[in-house]
Structure formats: structure tokens, C-alpha cells
Image (spheres, helix red, strand yellow):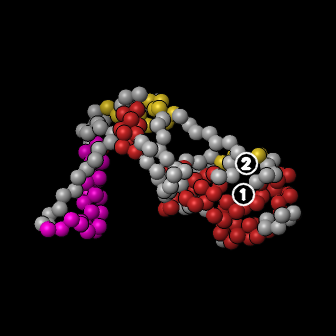
Amino acid sequence: GYDDLLTRLAGALAAEGSAARVRMAQRWPIVMVDEFQDTDPVQWQVIERAFSGRSTLILIGDPKQAIYAFRGGDIDTYLRAAATAGDKQTLGTNWRSDSVLVDRLQAVLRGAELGGPDIVVHDVQANHQGHRLVGAPHNDPFRLRVVTRNRAGTKVIPIADLRDHIGKDLAADIGALLTSGATFDGD
């Protein structure tokens, strides 16, 4: 399988002067890894052994997404790889989201450490000003919802109850948006 191929390649690259290291570095003098935040430990082992110090290695990734293990990423691997970088660049502009969403998220998350001090939410500017969603029933791009307990005397809501409530609430919200006639004035 795929995992076996990666493990075997990592093994072939283990020795400093291995034929695999020499051949890969010669074949690919410039290596760019996009969505690097989803790289697992074995993948990083292959990349590091084959190219680190031999090729120009460009890692493109969003550290704020490295915290999502369900996507296959590994925060420790990301941080270990980022520590090897000679030069770090960051985008100062969010090209996807509207400014109203970016501004509200920054008000809530500004300066937050996501998994450690090396992954901090920094301010960015939004390329798209205002709202591009027109006519939505709730046109606020960021809302906090409050779930209240039905039982007196308890501070904890069972997770099964929360999952059921959140799923229904989200479905109702999306249903209202889809039937509202709202339009997206995007470019």
C-alpha cells in the first residue's frame, strides 16, 4: 500500500550517502511541498532525508491548520519542520474571506496560541471588503450560539445531546440560507 511505499522509501533514504538520496536530490534540485501542514512524520522523514541541505526546499503550509489531526497532519511534525526553515514568510492578506468575517475572527482569536507558542493567530487584512453574501437571513458572518441546559443542578451537557442539537441547529441555519434567495456577489 501507499504507507508501505513511504516507509520503504524512508528506509532507503536512511543512510547519509544512499543512492536514493543522491538520485532524488539530483533529479529535483527545487522541491515545493504545498499544504505542508498535512504532512505526517514518515512523509517529513522522506522529504528531510532526500532534500534538506541538498535541494532548495520550499514548504508551504498554514500552521493554524496543522492542529487538525483529522486531516492527517501532525502538529509536532509541522513544528519540527518549521524549525529547520532558513527563511519564513507569511501572507498578510486573506484572499478568500470577507473583511467582516476576518475582522470578527481576529477580535476573538487575536494572539491566541493554537497548540503552542509557535502557532499564534496574527492579524491579516482581507482582500474582499464588506459582505459578498447578499440577502441572507442572518448576514453576520460570525455568530456565537448559546446552548442552554434543560436540567437543573448540572453544569455539564452530555456530548451526545450537544452533537444532536448542533447538527439540527446547523441544518436549520443552512436550510434557511438556501431557501432565502440570498446571492453571492463574488468575483
What amino acid type should be assigned to the residue bearing mark 1?
Answer: Ile
In the rendered image, the residue lying farthest to the top is: 129
Residue segment shown in magenta? 153-177
Q: Say left or right for 75 vs 186.
A: right
Q: Which residue is painted at 52% across and 59% down in the image?
A: 71
Q: Which mark is residue 57?
A: 2
Q: Which mark is residue 47?
A: 1
Instruction: Determine crowd level at label 2: few under 14, some 14-19, many 20+ residues with C-alpha closer than 10 A.
Output: some
On whether residue 99 falls in the magenta region, the answer is no
Give the CA separation, mark 2 to mark 1: 9 Å
Residue at the image point whose x is 72% and y is 57% from the top: 47
When asked about the image quadrant of residue 157, the answer is: bottom left
User: Where does the image place residue 36, in percent across and percent down from the top left?
Assistant: 61, 52
Q: Name the residue type under label 2.
A: Leu
Report which quarter residue 179 is drawn in.
top left
Q: Nearer the viewer, residue 125 or 6?
A: 125
Which residue is pictured at 25% across the width and 68% down the height? 158
Does residue 123 sit above or below 120 in this rendering? Answer: above
Report x, y in % for residue 149: 17, 62
Q: Earlier in the sequence, mark 2 or mark 1?
A: 1
Q: Is residue 107 visible?
A: yes
Q: Is residue 109 left or right of residue 24?
A: left
Can you tell which mark lies on residue 16?
none
Q: Secondary structure at mark 1?
A: helix
- The image shows residue 140 at horizontal and vertical percentages of 29, 38
Q: Secondary structure at mark 2?
A: strand
Q: Nearer the viewer, residue 184 or 128?
A: 128
**Callout 2 touching callout 1 (CB < 8 Å):** yes
